[in-house]
Image (cartoon, coloured by chain):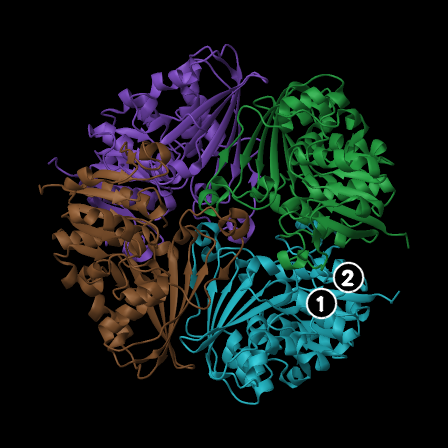
Chain colours: A purple, B green, C cyan, D brown
Amino acid sequence: MKKKINIAIAGASGLTGTELVKLLLGHPYAQLEHISSRTYKGQEIGAVYPGIESRLAFTERIGPSQLKQTDVLFLCLPPHDSMHYLKEVLAGYGGMVIDVGSDFRIRDPEEYQKWYGAKHLLPEILDRFVYGLPEINSQRIKGAKYIANPGCYPTSVLLGVYPLLDSGLVDIDSLMVDSKSGVSGAGRKCKDPYLFIHLNENFYAYSPEGHRHIGEMEQEIESIYKKRVVVSFTPHLLPLSRGIFSTIYVKAKNIDAGLQALYEKYYGQCFFVNYSRAVPQIRDVAGTNHCLICARHDRRAGVLKVFVAIDNLVKGAAGQAVQNMNIALGFAEQEGLKLQGIHT
Amino acid sequence: MKKKINIAIAGASGLTGTELVKLLLGHPYAQLEHISSRTYKGQEIGAVYPGIESRLAFTERIGPSQLKQTDVLFLCLPPHDSMHYLKEVLAGYGGMVIDVGSDFRIRDPEEYQKWYGAKHLLPEILDRFVYGLPEINSQRIKGAKYIANPGCYPTSVLLGVYPLLDSGLVDIDSLMVDSKSGVSGAGRKCKDPYLFIHLNENFYAYSPEGHRHIGEMEQEIESIYKKRVVVSFTPHLLPLSRGIFSTIYVKAKNIDAGLQALYEKYYGQCFFVNYSRAVPQIRDVAGTNHCLICARHDRRAGVLKVFVAIDNLVKGAAGQAVQNMNIALGFAEQEGLKLQGIHT
Amino acid sequence: MKKKINIAIAGASGLTGTELVKLLLGHPYAQLEHISSRTYKGQEIGAVYPGIESRLAFTERIGPSQLKQTDVLFLCLPPHDSMHYLKEVLAGYGGMVIDVGSDFRIRDPEEYQKWYGAKHLLPEILDRFVYGLPEINSQRIKGAKYIANPGCYPTSVLLGVYPLLDSGLVDIDSLMVDSKSGVSGAGRKCKDPYLFIHLNENFYAYSPEGHRHIGEMEQEIESIYKKRVVVSFTPHLLPLSRGIFSTIYVKAKNIDAGLQALYEKYYGQCFFVNYSRAVPQIRDVAGTNHCLICARHDRRAGVLKVFVAIDNLVKGAAGQAVQNMNIALGFAEQEGLKLQGIHT
Amino acid sequence: MKKKINIAIAGASGLTGTELVKLLLGHPYAQLEHISSRTYKGQEIGAVYPGIESRLAFTERIGPSQLKQTDVLFLCLPPHDSMHYLKEVLAGYGGMVIDVGSDFRIRDPEEYQKWYGAKHLLPEILDRFVYGLPEINSQRIKGAKYIANPGCYPTSVLLGVYPLLDSGLVDIDSLMVDSKSGVSGAGRKCKDPYLFIHLNENFYAYSPEGHRHIGEMEQEIESIYKKRVVVSFTPHLLPLSRGIFSTIYVKAKNIDAGLQALYEKYYGQCFFVNYSRAVPQIRDVAGTNHCLICARHDRRAGVLKVFVAIDNLVKGAAGQAVQNMNIALGFAEQEGLKLQGIHT
């Protein structure tokens, strides 16, 4: 049996953090050693969240002494907190970093400032972070030391459009994305709009003029396609707990047939990304690390529609982070991710 | 006080039929006389649906003797049933007909056959039906005898795009519509996909290659705009009971400002269609006959986004039918429709 | 036509307050003149809550000058706030008061302090408040000047047990009540337990050792039955917006038949309280002022089960308040309450 | 590594069957070989249910040749079907049987007929079935060949009352149980009452005069307590997918303290049944095999309230079936059941 990897999670009490804890507790080669939470410091995670089977206690902060024993450090911190924390500890830490937050996804500090409204504190290391979308970037993830885990929306959008980019089938400049996310996408923020009384029996669009995840989508499309593409992206909030469904619209150019073949050319060897002949549903992926994609040609309108479903907390966050760790360390991609869905 | 209008509803036990019953019971000038239901014939509607305050009993069918006393006949029947029924009774009926179903919305019998998969039984009277979207067609609705009540999705889409058509602000040929509907849009069909266990915590797109309501949208846009526009339309199913939220995407051409002014030019005098500065939410309109619209210019992408929220059972069906009756008969448009929303 | 009654509502922006606003806007003899809200002072209610059709603006406080023109003052304030406010304004106000809050339901100041944890500020006027449960107290409500509107749970429980108290059919001392309430029962409090992410797909009991509404239930049972009865009451939180379902258990003594007859003896003339042969469902009453009751004898166990469904915001709060006003002022009980349910 | 156990599941496409498939696919010593489904024969389970990671195909029926290779046969069949099937195959099958259905829970054939409305087809083997509630019956489950897996409601109720039976703290004859179950308890039946449009925003009691699970509860209480106790049981339907919350009421006799100590005396060594100081919530156990129990003394009313939460599909069905298999075969009780909850 392989030697276990020592793991620390900074910010382990939020929705992404706890999802990651649950996955790593079931990972055969991971040893979860340190978890931090300012709110729950000193308490056992299984006491705070009875659904978690573990007696590990939260510490207030993962400090130098804990980092010394750590092989992989996951950051599940709010925007800006990852870079603050890394700035403090990076000098004394030699292990792998996987940022499940948003501070290291944008490689250009100016772009970062534009989308996140703050000056980046570690611009000099942005280049060292690999964008951890394994089905696109696996070669670079292998052996990577610093990984920026993609946002939930970009994961669904990039996986949906990747096979199209160089296909010549579509006019990629007309990309419009209508995404719908379950409430866990907003975390556990205690604000009026996230109250049950407000969201139950409700639905709406938000950030209509621009959402932070756009910068990340455009950066990665450019990185693959070698041309700048502007994405028109609109997120919506669904009255359910977990799942993202993205509907991607793009002008069709020369689609005769073979959409399934195209997607399978790219994803046929991928365990977690699958082409679905039927339009996927959120219930098909909830609780799993899978991404289901279906493309349909609306001939009348000359539009290609791509439907993508993921679980925002798994493939859109914690599951993908584990997948990245597996690839980076040379484990089988599926270790700790052989999850069965919640619904049947 | 005005003399009361005698009303009959064919197909009064479905979701649209019962919504109409509830509205007409509260209408000051309506006298609901006859309601039909094959399933519940002989039973009082208030016994079948305890939420309805009425002791009126369902008859199996609204026959000639009942039609003789009827001033307004509403049809809330499944596709194809309205034309079958009208074919049988029309010769002996001289009052007004408001078809809340889908058989008389498409004026061209060939188009009808294309979208609804059946030969029309009364092609000769299709022309006599006015398309009952009051905020666009009120002049033709006044005094009309035959009214085809719009579909729920077309109501949301047409109201959203109407002010844009002749505005010169957008490239109307790029129209893409992503609509999301609550489950009541599917009526009370007892099929596996509509089970609670299937829809709860779920979301998905359906009819990805074409939905019947497209024909209706394109017909009405052509009727206003005098040019054929192809609509790329994708409906989705929301895990909630009532409400439609449509997100409309169209390439922006010359938008400098004045979106609110534009919409208010068209709807400023309309009681039920209102421009909203904030993106509307389904909760804002549930239980009312209002349509809330907000438009936002995504400058980066050169796209205009129009957000429209309605209650599919009210403005998208029964409420609009009452509004049409009011206008046709010369009542104030709001009679019987001074509804307060379900949510605050 | 009767002269309209001038109405003021203190605390009109909460869930109960807005429900009351909606009802009074549709009341033929009510003229809503003043509504207060500290949070939304200066804003129009229809702008804050688009589902409400009204341009009336919130004032910060209903002061002496407004009270001078007021015939009926409704209080929809949090615990303790009603008595604070009344203490300030009562001297200068000569009209009717209907407290929809909880400060004037308990007539004994010591009992009040025990259940509400505060000294009562107006113990001298507690006796002047009539407990406004119309189906039990209508004689005292007629012409009353001060009315304490019952709590939502007590409304469901008292209506369920009232016909049993003197029936000799049950051993009333074994009363156990298991109530389940929708989330609107907690108002719009912005606290973690009321987040969508916490309540969705969840259910639990709360206040297991005692809930404030018990004092009110026991007081009113004693008032009717002339004996002290201890109620074992347990509230639970349902993942839905509106509705209470109470299941009442009591040892059966001599039940042979005639449960329906018994309930109809008490409620046969009541418009809003109805015996239902089938077990009622929350969907049957949501959006209405009705209370549906069904009693079943579990012969094997010697237990009578009484099932009661109400809409907590209507019959459990705002609707009952309007019903009380109607009775007190001599209007027909149903004025402004001819509501059709939300669901069919 | 231990040799793998060959497993067959008859009726593997229902909600319980698929939950069992998912658990066994993750069990280190189980080899799932045969799964049957009349509806989906010939199809791969992962194609029918995309949330399941498996390419195993359904056969129409588990026949003699398949049974020959089978070590453990699970039955997840509707009422009456298990005994029909076993009658046909039992002669030629020598392995273990775990009936997750309801045909072998009641040991007295007359009682069976009374509660299930049918004559038992295999009365002679009823005695050979062990009632598989591990925390009570583990000694008898060890090495058992035939196991009747408990019903979901009885699991919650028996675990809640077991420590009380011989405690002398309560008057066990006054047992009243108010249970609330998520919709998965009804399986995937396609009937009007289980439609989303009917259950969403709804709640109600059903089977008010007696539910089949009562016979099972009373049989097991008698088996432990050596006295007949009549249980007054009332099930309710919750608008959520998975989970049962049972509230148990029993007259308190001599409760001074030590409720937690009492429960821990019985369950302190149990991995899956835990005493909780706070009232448990369905979200705490959803997706796990845990049962959380909390007891509270309502001193005013002299009532002990016991709150029990389980996931009806796991501890109430498939998870407990796996737990029984583990114990019967000498595996660690938790094998294949180290599940992390759905919610945090």
Q: Position of residue D205 (x, y in %)?
A: 48, 63
Q: Residues within 10 Å of mark 2 (few under 14, many from 20)?
A: some
The image shows residue B25 at horizontal and vertical percentages of 75, 54
Vertical placement of residue A307 versus A15, above or below: above
- In the rendered image, residue D218, in percent from the top left (x then y), is placed at 31, 70
Q: Disc 2 and disc 1: Cα gap in Å?
A: 9 Å
Residue C14 in view in this figure: no
The numbered dot on residue C27 is: 2
Q: Residues within 10 Å of mark 1 (few under 14, many from 20)?
A: many
Q: Is residue C206 above or below residue B152?
A: below
Q: Are marks 2 and 1 in contact (CB under 8 Å)?
A: yes
Dot 1 falls on a residue whose secondary structure is helix
The quarter of the displayed image where residue A278 is located:
top left
- Which quadrant: the N terminus of chain A? top left
Give the structural element (helix, strand or loop) at label 2: loop
Q: Nearer the viewer, residue D85 or D7?
A: D85
Q: Nearer the viewer, residue A67 or A165?
A: A165
Q: Which residue is mark 1?
A: C322
The quadrant in which the C terminus of chain A is found is top left
* Relative height, residue C1 to residue A146 (above, below): below
At x 53%, y 56%, the residue is D202
Q: Which mark is residue A117?
A: none
Which residue type carries mark 1? Val
Chain under callout 2:
C
Q: Is residue C273 left or right of residue B239?
A: right
Amino acid at pointer 2? His
